Image (tube, coloured by chain):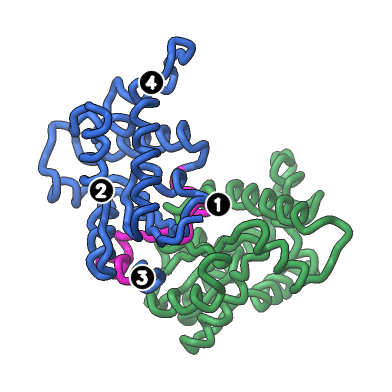
Chain colours: A blue, B green
Amino acid sequence: MMKNRIITISREFGSGGRTIGKMVSEKLGIPCYDAELIHKIAQESGFSENYIKNAGEYTPGGFLSSAFANRSFGPTNEDYLWNIQYKIITELAEKESCVIVGRCADYILKDKADCLKVFIHADMDFRAERIVKVYGEREVVPEERLRDKDKRRAAYHRFYTNMKWGCAQNYHICLDSGKLGIAKCSEIIKELY
Amino acid sequence: MMKNRIITISREFGSGGRTIGKMVSEKLGIPCYDAELIHKIAQESGFSENYIKNAGEYTPGGFLSSAFANRSFGPTNEDYLWNIQYKIITELAEKESCVIVGRCADYILKDKADCLKVFIHADMDFRAERIVKVYGEREVVPEERLRDKDKRRAAYHRFYTNMKWGCAQNYHICLDSGKLGIAKCSEIIKELY
């Protein structure tokens, strides 16, 4: 068991989980890995950051077709990325205490590190309003975008971790950022650490 | 919408959810309904308290056979109890701010009252040790008892509320009482109220 203490944050798209992760890391004076993680995976894998950001969770062809690909032809791109991601997250946790957002870090560090496992979610209205504010308007209505991303994220988690995404029993604390507010959520997590 | 503020606590058997409810209610100086609720349902229905405590969630024949009963012969005992429970919980919430443990209060008060919806869970080892300490040894090993109760509780919730029990998105906050400790959980809930 590693000596560092890690906070892993899984989150629904648009719930503000990433912002909460950054706030917690600032309060505690430890690093927060999110975009940095993608940068590292890109460096090691040779794939573009954009591909990685979208691989698995988002691309229409990407993960879902990969999940059903016949692996007797060898691992898919997503399997290859998963292995690199696995290695990088393990190394980060060995190096120092930190906050890690997304990327199944809770599963990867299970039985390896002292983790506080957090899940952030919010209702559709809150997230729809927030993604338009943060990411701007798109052709697809925000509710559709959210439903699609939720579905992909859940499928990705299920496939690589065999755990149900968003099932309370998989986390130490689950918070509704819409009801409780993003600042309050980060406060509670900081207090628990 | 009622003016009172209610804390509803759903919980896995043995997780200490009831103890947490009592601690929160004492800290806040508002009543906690748990055994009292069963007493009220018994008075109104004519069934014994023991039957009600076990109806739905626990009895081997009780809820599960009721769920699959042919309702063209009319409502089952469990349906009858559900209606009384529905009425009593609604009246309690109308009367005053309070903590309500179990009995699908979160679902019953949805869109009616300002609720803080809490779910308490813990891993098997923590709960197994705790139920032996609190309820004493039984013939069946504690892990078996827990698995059975979890299954019944989940089925009961699903049947009457059409919501998945233990799904983080159904609650404002979910806490692992085994990892965080019962005292800390009650502290967090009190702070949020």
The residue that appears at 51% across and 55% down in the rendered structure is: A1
Name the one closer to the observer, B27 or A78: A78
CA gap, disc 2 and disc 3:
20 Å
Disc 4 packing (10 Å; few <14; some 14–19; many ≥20)? some
**Same chain for the residues under marks 1 and 2 in the image:** no
Residue type, numbered disc 2: Asp
CA gap, disc 2 and disc 4:
24 Å
Residue type, numbered disc 1: Trp
Where disc 2 sits, the SS reads loop
CA gap, disc 1 and disc 2:
31 Å
Tag 1 subunit = B
Q: Are marks 2 and 3 in contact (CB under 8 Å)?
A: no
Q: Quadrant of the N terminus of chain B?
A: bottom left
Q: Earlier in the sequence, mark 2 or mark 3?
A: 2
Coordinates of residue B129 in the picture (x, y in percent) = 72, 66
Q: Are marks 1 and 4 in contact (CB under 8 Å)?
A: no
Can you identify the residue that label 3 sits on? Answer: A188
Can you identify the residue that label 2 sits on? Answer: A34
Single out the residue that lies furthest toward the bottom.
B29
Tag 3 subunit = A
Can you identify the residue that label 1 sits on? Answer: B165
**Same chain for the residues under marks 2 and 4 in the image:** yes
- Residues rendered magenta in the picture: A165-187
Single out the residue that lies furthest toward the left.
A136
Counting the numbered discs, the total is 4
**Same chain for the residues under marks 2 and 3 in the image:** yes
Q: Is residue A176 magenta?
A: yes
Coordinates of residue B134 in the picture (x, y in percent) = 74, 73
CA gap, disc 3 and disc 4:
38 Å
Can you identify the residue that label 4 sits on? Answer: A66
